[in-house]
Image (tube, helix red, strand yellow):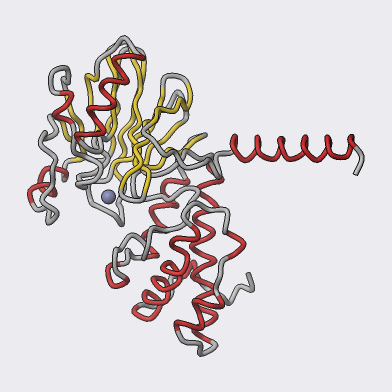
Amino acid sequence: MKVNQITRIIFTLAIFLLIRISDGMAAPPAAERSIEHIRGSIYTAHYPMNDSIYNSIFMVTEDGIVLVDPVSAGAARWLKEELKERFDQPVRYIIYSHFHFDHAPGAEVFSDTVVDIYAQEHFIENLENDPFNNKTKVLPTKTYRGRMELTFGTKKIELLDITSNHTNDTTVVRFPDEQIIFTVDVAPAGRIAWRYFGGWEVQDSNDFGLALTDMETIMALDFDFIVPGHYYHQPPEGLRRAYEYQIDLCKRVLTEMEAGHDLPQIIEKVTMADYSDLVKFDDFVAMNVEGMHYQLSQNEPDARCSITDGS
Ligand SMILES: [Zn+2]
């Protein structure tokens, strides 16, 4: 092989890697807590834990920092120190994406500077009825239903509640000037579904059809980047691809079921290898197949999973 051929291959590989990194489809896993700049005054904080990467998002404004989801007291203490070093502003406002014990706790760490905490109106009753003994110590001071527009200094934030498959207090946070949205546990952009579609066990799997509806609602919003509550920010195509994966999974499992194959055969045949670039593919693809098989055994297939259209 000639030197210029090798140079060309290396150059091509470098461009490929650059595209992969810049399109956000396969960023390397962060081993440590870190802060990532997304755009303008918007940053994500990544916290690796529980075999996942959890995210907060925050906006730095003239009126203080607005933080969405402290995640945990430990993560919040770390973030507070980092913010002190990097920015000349304290955390003045917190927004909760939803009440779950692995996203909302930790706000007490900022109680010396926080003015208001926002959440959807069902947040408080959900917390009171939480079977997981929620560690969230600080209740919201302001709640809303439908849509709420907030202004901090010159920056704007929109809160949108969505009729969600995940919880009834789910808020999508939209930063309209930066064209960024933050969604938690409702839109697995750039990755496959967690275990059995959100369920730890197959019988707890979230309803596939409703999960698609959530993704459709979110895809209809205007944004350049989606920051999910887990893993890495994505362009809209990252969400579109996760959505197409779920529909293709449904079609392929249904085809095998209609051919009379049993679950072990279906797991072997439906490899979904054309989606192997999605995050958590190797860990969860067999569980996703089993979860889909379980749902299709229990329910009529969702219309969007119809296999009569030849696709
Ligand atoms: Zn959740």
Where 137 sits versus 39, above or below?
A: below
Q: How many marks?
A: 0
Q: Classify 177 as above or below 26.
A: above
Of residue 12 and residue 61, the one placed in the foreground of this image is: 12
Q: Closest to the observer: 195 or 244? A: 195
> Can you name the residue that lies furthest to the left here?
128
Residue at 50% x, 58% y is 281
Between residues 180 and 161, which one lies in front from this camera angle?
Answer: 180
Residue 157 pos. (x, y %): 34, 26
Left or right: where 180 falls relative to 54: right
Q: Where on the picture, by quarter, is residue 97?
A: top left
In screen coordinates, is 52 left or right of 232? Answer: left
Q: Residue at x 50, y 54 (%)?
A: 242
x, y percent for residue 126: 13, 49
Farthest residue to the bottom: give it. 260
Identity of the residue drawn at 80% across and 40% down:
9
In front here: 73 or 299? 73
Left or right side of 151 for 228: right
State whether residue 77 is above or below residue 304: above
Residue at image point 49% right, 56% down: 243
Residue 99: x and y in percent read: 20, 45
- Residue at the extreme right: 2
**Residue 266 to residue 114: above or below:** below
Where is residue 163 shown, x and y percent of the image? Answer: 30, 51
Left or right of residue 15, residue 36 in this image: left
